[in-house]
Amino acid sequence: MVARVPIMFAVTLWSHISFPSLQAHATATAVEGERSPNKEAANTQLAIFEWKRGDSIRQYISQPMRPALIKNSPVNGWRSAKWTPTTLSGMLGKAKIPVKNSTGNVFHMGCCALHRVELREAIERCEAGSEEEYIYFSGPLSHFGKVWAGREINLDMFNMKEVPIDAAKEAGDVILKAHLWIGSKGVVTPTHFDEMHNFFVQIYGSKTFTLLPPSAWARLQLYPKFHHQHRNVIADLEDEKTFKSLFSDPSSGMMTVTLSAGDLLYVPPLWFHRVETISKTSISANIWSASKTVHGANKAWLESFPVDVDWGFVETIRVISEFLRQLIKAILPKERILSYVTELKQARYESLYRFGENITTACPFEIYEESHEIKEHNKYLEQVESEAPSFLSQTDIKKTAYEMWCNPSEKTTKKAAEYVPNVKRHFDGLDQGMAEIYLGNYIEDLASQIVGFEEIVKYLESCISRPLSEK
């Protein structure tokens, strides 16, 4: 049989297969200094800091990581701090940029076609303030030239230097990247998370961020890993009733902050955030910096898992299922195990079935099939299915019959136990919300390799949830 191989990594087949991930993973970073929030933060969950002369950005990142609003930081002295719609048009007005425009204000991934227009025109359309057209641009600062970008914004200030350059190149990671954002009033970037340190600088106008911790993944109904909306959420937070039902409880950890020109917001890896433009036109920049714990946790996917080269499908599904059950028990608190598997099945998969039968494409909103994001995702899935179909599809076993082999044998139980510690150590140090997100991704990767995407819900019920509840 041929093993499913994510494209970014090379692995050996069957014999001690390494199963890597396309997604990075994240947790807390080391703190080199501490700062106390000012009085404004006393009655809010969001920490608010006043930058002190000589400080380093690292001093404002707490352990465990929490969002922070930083006032009076050096960004106010950048040349970009003087940007306005007029000055930016004067500098870059003739530069052609890929803009999304829509009659709707929520710009989901793959929502719309891209139109190349001059930056000056995009800003003029934002300033016109039409309620019949929303304008959205997001693109790398380097699009306008590295020399210009380096002169206007001090990227090095946000380089955490946590991941060695050679190690990052080997893993296909990016050390530092920056984006420019331009949007008209009402434009919404829907709730999602990123997997790097995110430093967001509001340059002109204002934006409101709604922030939620990684532990909110289940109530937000995080999309499956292999879905084109991965890192985004299924729950419709634009619906006021839905929003209130999910987050009326103060224990949800939700934070809201409106940024004005000169504000610097730190959003930790895996923190969900929704962003809305409040002013007529907003100009922002953000810098992502690689995290050593993101880089380190990704190595869980490079560990071998327990499969012998001479095993057939029956022994393979037995040992992998037992391996996943043992891994869940090793990573999560005992009282969380059964509820976690139930929530994983319901939130990330079953909640999609009301929008379609295929969980890799089902979506509650209309997508533009010709968008770059959707085309690239579909190409990836086609390549995976072509080069490495699921093990189940390579046998003559009926799909309705495989669950009878989910329970372990003495041999597979012992074999599985040998491999759990090597994978589990990469989850150590992650807070529980982060660990649950990545554990779900890991389970999805292995389950889809064994039985295929379309069988994941049934597999979770038959091979993970039911055996765990019987023990």
Image: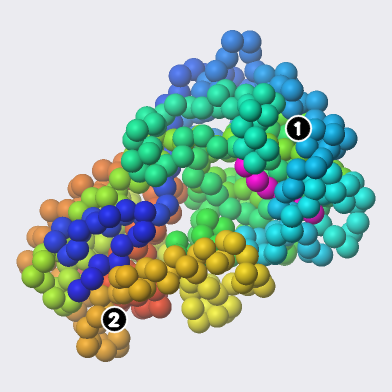
Residue 308 image-quadrant placement? bottom left
Q: Is residue 231 left or right of residue 432?
A: right
Mark 2, secondary structure of its residue: helix
| Residue lying at 7% horizontally and 66% vertically, measured from the top left | 411
The mark tally for this picture is 2
Question: How far apart are labels 2 and 1 at the CA level?
Answer: 53 Å
- The quadrant of the rendering that contains the N terminus is bottom left
Magenta residue check for 137: yes
- Residue 59 is situated, as x and y percent measured from the top left of the image, at 53, 21
Magenta residue check for 144: no
Q: Amino acid at mark 2?
A: Ser
**Residue at mark 1:** 203
Query: Can the viewer see residue 264 in this picture?
Result: no
**Residue 393 — which label?**
2
| Residue lying at 30% horizontally and 86% vertically, measured from the top left | 399
**Residue 370 — which label?**
none
Mark 1 Cα shell of 10 Å, populated few (<14), some (14-19), many (≥20): many
| Residue lying at 20% horizontally and 48% vertically, measured from the top left | 421
Q: Which residues are magenta?
A: 135-140
Query: Can the viewer see residue 52 in this picture?
Result: yes
Mark 1, secondary structure of its residue: strand
